[in-house]
Image (spheres, helix red, strand yellow):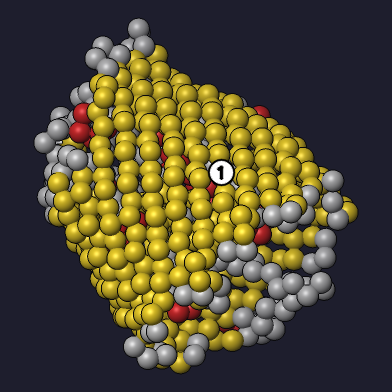
Amino acid sequence: MGRKESRKKLGATLAAALGFAALYSGGGHAFAAEANGAQEAVTEHVLDETVVTATRTPVRDLKTNANITVITGKDLEKRHYTDLTQALRDVPGVTVNEYAPAGYNNSTKFYINGSEDVVVMIDGVKQNYAGGFAASLTTAMKDLSGIDRIEVLHGSASTLYGSDAKGGVINIITKKAKKAKATVEVAYGSFGKQLYSVAYEGSENGLDWRFKYQKDKSNDFKDGHGNEVPSGLDADSVNVHLGKDLSKASYLVFNLRTYQDGDRYQALYEKKQGLSQNRGRYNHFDADLIWNVKIDDTSKNQMALSRSHYNYNTLTHGMWTPGGSSYELDVRSWKFSDQYDKRFDDHLLTAGVDFTYDDTSIWNRGSKSIDAKNLTNRSVYLQDQWSITPELKLIGGIRYDNNSAFGSHTSPSVSLGYDITPKTHAYVSYAGYFLTPTPNQLYAPTYGNPNLKPESGNTQEIGIAHDFGMGLNVAVHYYRRHSKDRIGYDPTTYVNINVGDEDAHGWDLQVAKRFDSHVSARLGYTNTHVDKTEQRDVNVDGYLPRHQWNIGVDYKNRRFDASLMARAMLDRPGPMKDAFPETSYWVCDLAMNYKIMETTKVYLKVNNIFDKFYAEHSNVKWGAPGEWWTAPGRSFVVGMEHSF
């Protein structure tokens, strides 16, 4: 390591340490209310919030036997993220690897606890589809205004959520409209950024509704060195929510979401070498029918039926593929789930069933279409939350999966939580997981391997959270994960294979501080280590940083609010020397909002304030120095929202 690089790392670490010290040094009042008396949650990981993802039942965050970060709807509203993947960048422990703002959507990944296998839920209904990474779902979620909060669960959770819940779970809880209003939004910015949306919501006689249409567009962008990179996006989103109170104890809701885009992208090194330009099309449709019933004071039930269709197509042209090369993934799915909760004295039992049917077609130019490849998975699970004493809770569960291609498997979990004091909670946990290969991994031309075995493993975790009072909350967690028959690929043939066992461990620190009714801050540090496998070097070829910092400061008064967000990726060397422009870097964003009147707001968003030159994907290992997919440099977006 050179002296210059060492100084950069030292300076970055000192800056983060100073930010951490600032959280402790300030005085202030505990979460003071605004003038209207409403107490507003403005920071992630507020330890006194009620969350549901860890146990599928409501529990105070401070009492949860899990590592959970909360992003509130207010956070999303004032920070003006481009999509949900961008919002997840500011969550400690989440690492995003993106090729470009538009293009390669189905190849973008994010990691939780060093794993890209993550479950995405909306109102408790699983959204994952065969052959698609979780990030391809969240990147397509452009409309964030209908979200009440997002709960990010770090750690394996297959007992409750099934396959894909190796790294964690992202549970999106939507808003229930209260008063009738229509909202229009218009925004323009750098790199041809355009946003237009119209929404209408309301509630009357037990019926609530929300309809929204949004158009997103962008063009070529410039990286941190001022180089213009070919890019383009033209996307349309439609969201429909209809809810009806059938009785005081019964609520039926229908949610429908569609997303369509056309995108293009070409890295600069690809352009210079006359290599292919990626042109993609992403079509996404899903609909959920959810019925919640409170049977009596001790029991309730949720039943859900879901239908989805995902179609992803890429077409490339260039000197190596003069006739064009095309790849298409088409997945149609049915999902059914039912969850029943019953309290018996000191026990809260949760029992459920899940059914998933995926019908997948994969097509490559020059290869036959692969049709009628389907997988069916049936699951049952049972969990008991036993309050041994008011301070001591034992949670145990088991899940049984029966897969049409891989037979049966059980995934157990157990955790023990103890309230050391009314404001201090500690826990230890063990959770098994089961990960089945997707039809894409099994049957895709060139890459597919029908002889793949399922991946399984377990995660052990220990954590402690404390509310210091005066608006200061701190939580620390450590995990260790062991994976058997890790699913990867052969680096010489590019065929999917089981690469053997993999071990990973890490820890994180999350701090939230409210100084007064105007200023709050948050800090997160994450340390990640994923062992070397036959397929990849340490930390997945260095794509995962060994050290990650997330720092944010929020300011609010009557009409104006601002959020400053900074994230650092430190010690990310990549698969070989000079694999990335820099092994350590900071990126800072700023969002500001001003209410002209109660119904009208203008805002400014500045991304990558210091015009940092960096890349999250690299081709250097297989190509030549400088072959990166560079990220956008500094950009501005100005917008206005008006309600009537």
Q: Quadrant of residue 19?
A: bottom right
Q: Which residue is mark 1?
A: 255
x and y, in percent, of residue 454 in the image: 17, 47
Quadrant for residue 515, please give it.
Answer: bottom right
Please report the residue visible at 60 percent of the width from the left and 67 percent of the height from the top.
43
Q: Residue at x 25, y 37 (%)?
A: 375
- Establish if 204 lies above or below 15: above
On the image, the x and y values in percent for residue 246 come to 61, 55
Residue plotted at (51% across, 45% down): 289
Q: Residue at x 43, y 20 (%)?
A: 277
Question: Is residue 368 toward the left or the right of residue 11 in the image?
Answer: left
Residue 571 showing in the rendered view:
no
Q: Is residue 555 left or right of residue 505?
A: right
The quadrant of the rendering that contains the N terminus is bottom left
Residue 640 pos. (x, y %) = 78, 43
Residue 461: quadrant of the picture: bottom left
In the displayed structure, would residue 151 be above or below residue 107?
A: below
What's the residue type where badge 1 is placed? Asn
Nearest the viewer among 554 and 538 is: 554
Extreme residue in the right direction: 597
Q: Position of residue 9 (x, y in %)?
A: 42, 61
Count the marks: 1
